[in-house]
Image: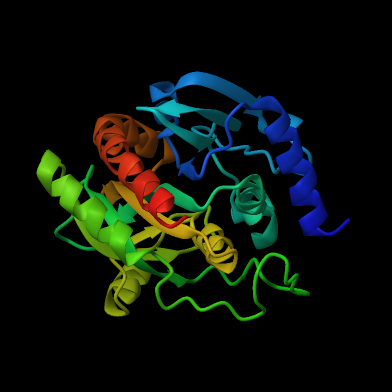
Amino acid sequence: MRDFDRAEKASALIRSCISVVPQVAVVLGSGLGGFADELSDVVRIPYSEIPHFPTSTVIGHSGRFVAGMLDGVPIAVMQGRSHLYEGYTAGEIAFPIRVLGRLGVRAVILTNASGGINATYQAGSLVVLQDHINFQGANPLFGPNDERFGPRFPDMTHAYTIGYRRMALAEGTRLGVDVHEGVYVGLTGPSYETPAEIRAFRAIGADVVGMSTVAEAIVARHMGMKILAISCVANRAADISNEELSHAEVLVAMKRAQGSVNTLLRAVIPKIQEDLVGLK
C-alpha cells in the first residue's frame, strides 16, 4: 500500500469520528500538550487507533489526535509527535502531516522545544521560525514521488509563510510575550549537542536547535500547506550554560512556558482561519 492510500485510510477514520473538518492544525511538541485542554466540543483519538499512524514513545508526548473548537474555530491538534531517534524514518514521522492534508487541513502550526543557540534568548523565549537547516541526514521525500501529494522538487525558499510569521511576531509583541524570529537547526538526537557543535551551528546562522519539525515542514510544503512554526526555548545550549541537560528539565521548563505558548496560539489561530477563508 502506498503512502497516499495509507493517508486516505487514516484520514477517513478521523473524518468518521468528527463532525466538522478543520482547516487549521497544531502539532504540539514536548511538554506542550496542555494546549489541547483549551478546546471545547472535543473528540480524542489515540494514535494507536489511527491506521498506519506512528506512536510516540517519549515522555511528554501523549500520542492523541484531538479535534475541537477554539474560540469558534474548528482545529485539529496533534498531542505529541514521533522522532527519528525512536527508530522511525523521516517519511514515517511526517506521515501525520500527510493525513492532515488529506483530511482537509490547509495550514499547520508546528511547535517544539529547543535549545537556545542565540545568546540573547532566555529559557521560556518563543522563537518564530523564519527558516531551518536540516542536519538530520534524511528527507521525508526520499524514494518515488507521488504527484498526488506534490511535485518531485518542492521549493523551500519560503517554507515558513511570511505573512504568518509577521502576524505571530506582531501578536506576541502586542501581548507582551517574549518572542523572536530565528533559524532552527534540526538534528537526530537523542543525545544533546556538544559545546563545539553549538559553536559550529551558531557560525552557520542557527538560533535554536532541536530534534523535530524539519521533516514535517518539508512534507507540509510538499503538499502546498501554509506553515507557522513556533519554537519554545527550554534551555540555553551547551556552550552558553555549564549545566547538564536532561529531558526532565526540558519538560519542567516547557510547563512553565505553556501559558505563553497558549496565549500566542489563541491569538494567531483565528487570524489564520480568516486568511484561509479569504483564499476561497
Rendered location of residue 119, percent (x, y): 17, 61
Residue shown at 68% from the left, 60% from the top: 91
Residue situated in front as seen by the camera: 142 or 252 = 142
Point 26% across, 30% down: residue: 259
Could one spot residue 35 in this view of the protein? yes
Q: Nearer the viewer, residue 268 or 128?
A: 268
Q: Nearer the viewer, residue 9 or 78?
A: 9
* Residue ranking furthest to the top: 41
Q: Position of residue 108 (x, y in %)?
A: 47, 50
* Vertical placement of residue 254 versus 158, above or below: above
Spot occupied by residue 4 in the image (x, y as percentages of width and height): 77, 57
Whether residue 89 can be seen here? no
Could you tell me which residue is drawn at 42 percent across and 22 percent down?
Answer: 37
Q: Is residue 253 left or right of residue 70?
A: left
Judging depth in this view, the residue of 85 and 104 nearest the camera is 104
Q: How is the image coloured?
A: rainbow
Q: Which residue is the extreme one toward the right?
A: 1
Q: Position of residue 7 (x, y in %)?
A: 74, 50
* 178 versus 142 height, above or below: above
